[in-house]
Image (cartoon, rainbow, N blue to C red):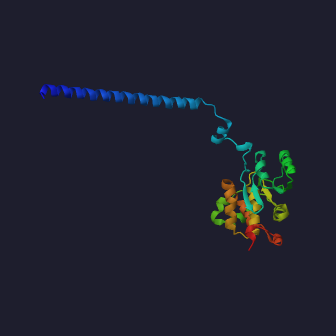
Amino acid sequence: MKVAELQVQLQHHHHLQQHQRQSKQKETTQMCRKIQLDVVDDHHHHLSRPVSSDAGAADGCDEVEDGEDFFIPPLNFSMVDNGIFRSGFPEPANFSFLQTLGLRSIIYLCPEPYPEANKEFMKSNGIKLYQFGIEGHMVSMSTSMCVEFVSSYSSLGSLFLEPFVNIPEDTIREALKVVLDVNNHPVLIHCKRGKHRTGCLVGCLRKLQKWCLSSVFDEYQRFAAAKARVSDQRFVELFDISSLKHLPMAFSCSKR
């Protein structure tokens, strides 16, 4: 075969391969464009498709299933022991949650009248109200009381120069009798914020349950936080439980 003929055949073969590659590339480009168009069309179709109520309920985190309300506990709510709870003042938004507790009674530690909405809730749920009006404002300490108080904690004297809250021992003692009566359980103890008056009552209950003072104060401070009052803790420390020791206590942490 002559060299000229061989060169012609090679050129023809080269052009044929080039043409095949171009055809294949064109087909691939058209296929990719078709796939892209299909995906875009499907995406637009999906976006324009109306969402059913069932799909919205399944995907929406903020939707409430079956029309039920969320349960919202009152401020500072916590369980004290079996059948005993504590909190701040219950608002109407908390009523659904309180219904789940099956309360028999509420111990209210403020002197102000109970709101009508709360009374209606208690009436419709067969809950009895025990009100022990303890003033929430602070009164000034006498000089002798201040000296005695500070001398007890001389190393931290500057920290304890604060007003006393007038907490009547007899009132706390009567409230404890209601708490200790299992016929009143489940019972909710509350004041305004569930910190000071409620903390004092629960602290005195803990003494009856033979808690050490450091644990009693730790619990008080968890709820009172930055509003903790040394005077409240002093009251709990000096509270005399001897007249209540004869009363039965059917609580989890008092059984031995």
The mark tally for this picture is 0
> Residue 181: horizontal and vertical position, in percent?
84, 65
The correct choice, above or below, for 102 with respect to 211 in the image is above
Q: Quadrant location of residue 6?
A: top left
- Whether residue 156 appears in this view of the structure is yes
> Residue 124: horizontal and vertical position, in percent?
86, 49
> Residue 35: horizontal and vertical position, in percent?
46, 31
**Residue positioned 21% across, 26% down in the render:** 11
**Residue positioned 71% across, 69% down in the render:** 211
Q: Is residue 75 left or right of residue 23?
A: right
The correct choice, above or below, for 9 with respect to 196 in the image is above
- Whether residue 177 appears in this view of the structure is no
Q: Which residue in the rendered view is the most extreme toward the left?
A: 2
100, 79: nearer the viewer: 100
Q: Which residue in the rendered view is the most extreme toward the bottom?
A: 256
The correct choice, above or below, for 77 with respect to 216 in the image is above
114, 125: nearer the viewer: 125
In the rendered image, the quadrant that contains the N terminus is top left
Q: Quadrant location of residue 33?
A: top left
59, 195: nearer the viewer: 59
Q: Is residue 185 left or right of residue 229?
A: right
> Residue 254: horizontal and vertical position, in percent?
75, 70
In the rendered image, the quadrant that contains the C terminus is bottom right
